[in-house]
Image (cartoon, coloured by chain):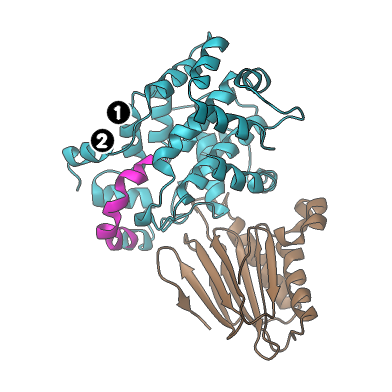
Chain colours: A brown, B cyan
């Protein structure tokens, strides 16, 4: 089954028939994690860096923000048996408009909050494709743990 | 480089606005608006009437009380809003299909159009900009130049993307360099050929321009809504986010970069309804 992750959304699965996909990441960030032993995968698509922008909305939907969405992604995968020491981590998105003064630097800020959280929690990124002006799509196949990225008008490429 | 005759031939292939849409735009433009005429124009077409009532009762514009007639819709939502909703139907004719040259599947460009139109309304309210009855339809039609260029893209894509990747060209600048014309200028030509009002032509034609000569807030609103949709990945094709934004356009609206997340958050609440709306049009 195709599980589509919308903007400010997250899905986890341990069902071999599932494919998790998030289309068209602009300045948003997609985080894909997969445990190859437990065969558990999860995909998050967050739109803004910090929940302090709107605490109430973050309570209703933690997946809108990086600082609440990322921990929620990992916790949901752990519930299905994933272990932090085994998960591979893929990050994509964070694109930016061509903007001389950085008024639209949300892509960059989205990426910085992720780096900060990962650094604090000793999470290593296995592959990242971040920044530039491209929109991206991430697809994860639960049965074999393969993760694919489509960038701009290019075809899907298997990245791990 | 595209020749003028080739461009004109391509513009003629589009399905133009029908006379009833032109009349509706004239009414939008006029100060004296005849409610009876608006009701008559819409009621004449049962399909349009049905579409209008379905949309009026969606939660994007809906009121607690169900709207059951064109007249009631006009009274409750106002003439401008009703006309803009009806004009969505005519705008969708050319915008709904897939634009594979830009790597946009069916309805993706249309989703971008509707989203930026709704966002334009939201930003107009937020910035208390003087009401501009054209901004909604201009937002819907602003990328019609992409529809004209779409089937040429395959042959020139590599060159265009190479220019963009080189880092110093926006997508519009690359289009201009390769085709001799860009999609906003082409959109303006389409709007002119359909006899749309000069204000609407201006907005479509300049939707990626800095235009320091103008103090027109509508243009800034149109641009800002377009860019926020791109950031949210709504109907974004292979051109991605490779467009320029100029500080002046934000200053014209008296907003700062700090306001952008709030605009995104407010718009986020409407995204589910917009998905439904795409299927209603």
Name the residue rendered at 77%, 74% in the picture.
A76
Disc assigned to residue A133: none
Location of mark 2 (residue): B12
Relative to A126, does residue A139 appear above or below in the rendering? above
Q: Which residue lies most toward the bottom here?
A: A37
Relative to A73, does residue B94 appear above or below in the rendering? above
Image quadrant where residue B119 sits: top right
Label 1 secondary element = helix
Q: Marks 2 and 1, how far apart in space? A: 9 Å
The magenta span reads: B143-161
Image quadrant where residue B205 sits: top left
Residue A93 x/y as whole percent: 56, 65
Find out whether residue B144 is within the magenta segment: yes
The answer to which of B70 and B148 lies nearer the viewer is B70
Question: In which chain is the residue bearing label 1?
Answer: B
Residue A3 x/y as whole percent: 62, 68
Q: Are marks 2 and 1 on the same chain?
A: yes
* Residue A130 showing in the rendered view: no
Neighbourhood count class around disc 1 (C-alpha, 10 Å): few under 14, some 14–19, many 20 upward: some
Query: Disc 2 or disc 1, which is closer to the eye?
Result: 2
* Residue B113 showing in the rendered view: yes
Question: In which chain is the residue bearing label 2?
Answer: B
Name the residue rendered at 48%, 17% in the picture.
B29
Q: Are marks 2 and 1 in contact (CB under 8 Å)?
A: yes
Location of mark 1 (residue): B193
Relative to A30, does residue B125 appear above or below in the rendering? above
């Amino acid at each position: 089954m195709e599980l589509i992750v919308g903007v400010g959304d997250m899905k986890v699965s341990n069902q071999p028939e599932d494919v998790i996909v998030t289309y068209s990441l602009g300045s948003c960030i997609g985080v894909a994690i997969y445990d190859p032993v437990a065969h558990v995968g999860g995909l998050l698509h967050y739109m803004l860096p910090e929940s302090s922008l709107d605490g109430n909305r973050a309570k209703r939907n933690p997946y809108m923000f990086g600082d609440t969405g990322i921990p929620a992604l990992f916790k949901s995968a752990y519930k299905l048996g994933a272990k932090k020491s085994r998960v591979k981590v893929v990050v994509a998105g964070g694109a930016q408009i061509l903007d001389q003064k950085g008024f639209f630097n949300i892509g960059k800020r989205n990426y910085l909050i992720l780096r900060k959280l990962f650094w604090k929690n000793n999470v290593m990124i296995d592959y990242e494709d971040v920044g530039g002006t491209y929109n991206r799509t991430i697809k994860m196949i639960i049965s074999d743990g393969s993760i694919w990225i489509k960038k701009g008008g290019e075809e899907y490429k298997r990245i791990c | 480089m595209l020749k003028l005759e080739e461009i004109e031939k391509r513009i003629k292939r589009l399905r133009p606005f029908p006379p009833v849409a032109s009349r509706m735009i004239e009414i939008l433009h006029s100060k004296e608006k005849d409610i009876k005429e608006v009701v008559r124009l819409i009621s004449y077409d049962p399909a349009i009437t049905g579409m209008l009532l379905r949309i009026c009762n969606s939660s994007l514009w809906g009121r607690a009380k169900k709207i059951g007639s064109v007249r009631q819709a006009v009274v409750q939502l106002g003439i401008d809003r009703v006309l803009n909703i009806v004009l969505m139907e005519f705008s969708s004719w050319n915008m709904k299909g897939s634009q594979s040259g830009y790597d946009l599947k069916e309805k993706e460009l249309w989703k971008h159009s509707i989203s930026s139109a709704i966002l334009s309304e939201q930003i107009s309210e937020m910035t208390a900009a003087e009401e501009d009855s054209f901004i909604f339809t201009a937002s819907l039609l602003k990328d019609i130049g992409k529809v004209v260029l779409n089937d040429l893209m395959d042959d020139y894509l590599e060159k265009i993307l190479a220019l963009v990747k080189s880092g110093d060209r926006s997508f519009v600048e690359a289009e201009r360099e390769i085709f001799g014309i860009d999609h906003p200028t082409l959109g303006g030509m389409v709007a002119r050929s359909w006899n749309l009002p000069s204000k609407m032509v201006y907005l479509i034609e300049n939707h990626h321009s800095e235009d320091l000569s103008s103090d027109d807030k509508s243009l800034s609103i149109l641009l800002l809504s377009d860019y926020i949709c791109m950031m949210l990945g709504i109907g974004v094709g292979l051109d991605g986010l490779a467009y320029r934004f100029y500080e002046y356009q934000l200053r014209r609206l008296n907003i700062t970069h700090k306001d952008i997340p709030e605009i995104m958050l407010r718009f986020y609440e409407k995204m589910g309804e917009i998905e439904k709306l795409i299927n209603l049009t």
